[in-house]
Amino acid sequence: MDAIQSLGALVLDVQAIQADFVMADGHKWLLGPEGLALFYCREELRDQLTLHEYGWHMVRDIGIYERKDWQIAASARRFECGSPNLLGAYALNASLSLLQEIGMQHVEAMVLARARYLIEAIRQHAELVLITSGQPGRYAGIVTFRHQRVDNATLFRHLTGQGVVCAMRGGGIRFSPHFYLAESQLDQALAVATSL
């Protein structure tokens, strides 16, 4: 399962959904740096994965360099062939600690509240067209819309030129407000979108 668009925004219980594999880059909803990702593999399947890279960090007896009969680690460390990205790991750990401190139930509620707020605000603007479904249970943290009179590329350049962080995807402009954004910031972003 590719969870990059939900992990860190919505509650995910890998045991409850009986996931075999889950992966997500750390730089999106997990608030971490680029270049480091999370990977979950159900323990019973770990030995079935073929290793294509080998290095000092994946051995069972890490740090014992004189051994000639090295064995691959039984733990998930078997997939870490080289030196870990420690700077990235510490940064991602800090981000994950923040999410855990706040609590994923609370984070999810806040992300969905911001999405709902955006959906309703977009519906109030005659110049904007909501692309994301506004039906409860059919949206998460990403809200996509387009402008009635302005093409997506022009709107995207205008928004980013005014410091609004967004993406041009899915036939429109994508806003992805995380739990920490205030509604006033969402209002400011929409004001920029409708100022053309």
Image: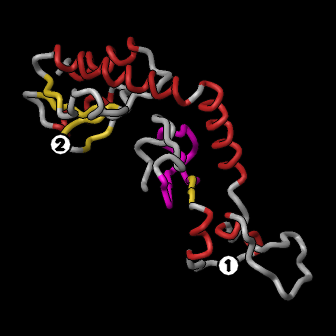
Q: CA distance from mark 2 to mark 1?
A: 42 Å
Residue 34, magenta (yes or no): yes
Residue bounds of the magenta highlight: 18-37
Q: Secondary structure at mark 2?
A: loop
Left or right of residue 170: residue 183: right
Q: Looking at the image, is 164 positioned above or below residue 71? A: above
Quarter of the image where the N terminus is located: bottom left
- Pointer 2 with pointer 1, Cβ within 8 A: no
| Residue that carries the numbered disc 2 in the rendered image | 171
Q: Looking at the image, is 71 positioned above or below residue 58? A: below
Question: Can residue 124 be seen by looking at this rendering?
Answer: yes
* Observer-nearest of 158 and 77: 77
Residue 101, magenta (yes or no): no
- Residue type at the position of mark 1: Tyr
Which numbered marker is on residue 179? none
Q: Position of residue 179 (x, y in %)?
A: 47, 24
Q: Earlier in the sequence, mark 2 or mark 1?
A: 1
